[in-house]
Every structure is written in C-alpha cells, then in structure tokens.
Amino acid sequence: MTHFSGGNQQKALLARWLAAGSRILLLSEPTRGVDVGARADLYRQWRALADDGAALLVQSSDFRELLGLADRVLVMRRGALVGEFRPDVITEQQLLSLASVGEVAS
C-alpha cells in the first residue's frame, strides 16, 4: 500500500476493516496527509457507517474535522477529561482553549 496516495491508503484500510466485519473503528489523525477531495469521500463513508450503526472513535488535532464529523466531542487535557459537547454548541476556538488551558475562554 505504500504506492497509494494518503487518501487511497485510508480507503483501502477502510475496505479491509469492513470486509473483516468491523463495527467499531478507532481512527487516530485519520486524514493527516489526505487531500481535500479524498477527505470528503472518507467523511461520507464514515458518516454512512455511523448511520448504519457502526461506532467510530476519532482522535484528531483538527478541530474543524471533529466538529464536522462528531455527534459529540470529548476534550482531554493531560490525560483527564475536561469537557464533553455536542459539536453545535462549541466553536473551534473554545475547543482550543479547553484543550490547552483547561477551560473555555469567555
């Protein structure tokens, strides 16, 4: 798979997991190195999986990505949970503040 682009590598891995019957996916920085077009395809595939009952746990430093993908966002700082939000009630700036300082800037 080393000859595929980042997006095609991710799609190939997703296909492998689905062929194996995986219903829980743990995704860490899943779109790092993936171009914008491939990201949109991956987002659609992941949303379809979630809508079909699969569980996806996504760890990402891309707050915009988290807010666009997640049904809820959990924020951790120094190994401790410091917040849990629906993505429609928190901004990227508030997430950054919470993750870096431990509280939401007012």
Image: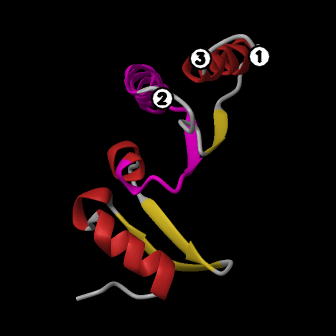
Give the residues drawn in magenta, as a range. 36-64
Report whether 63 appears left or right of 13.
Answer: left
Q: Rate crowding at label 3 as few (under 14), some (14 to 19) or many (20 or more) other CA atoms within 10 Å.
A: some
What is the quadrant of the N terminus in the image? top right
Report whether 60 appears left or right of 95.
Answer: right
Which residue is drawn at the image coordinates 70% and 26% (left, top)?
Answer: 22
Disc number for residue 46? 2
Q: Rate crowding at label 2 as few (under 14), some (14 to 19) or many (20 or more) other CA atoms within 10 Å.
A: some
Q: Main secondary structure of the magenta part?
A: helix
Vertically, is 56 above or below 23? below
Question: What percent of the width, then of the height, locates residue 106?
Answer: 22, 88
Q: Which residue is mark 1?
A: 2
Vertically, is 7 above or below 81? above
Which residue is drawn at the image coordinates 69% and 20% (left, top)?
Answer: 13
Disc number for residue 22? none
Looking at the rendered structure, the secondary structure element under dot 3 is: helix
Report whether 4 appears left or right of 85.
Answer: right
In the rendered structure, which amino acid carries the disc numbered 3?
Lys
Q: Nearer the viewer, mark 2 or mark 1?
A: 1
Q: Which residue is mark 3?
A: 11
> Between disc 3 and disc 1, whose residue precedes?
1
Vertically, is 102 above or below 29? below
Asked if residue 40 is among those painted magenta in the image, a careful observer would answer: yes
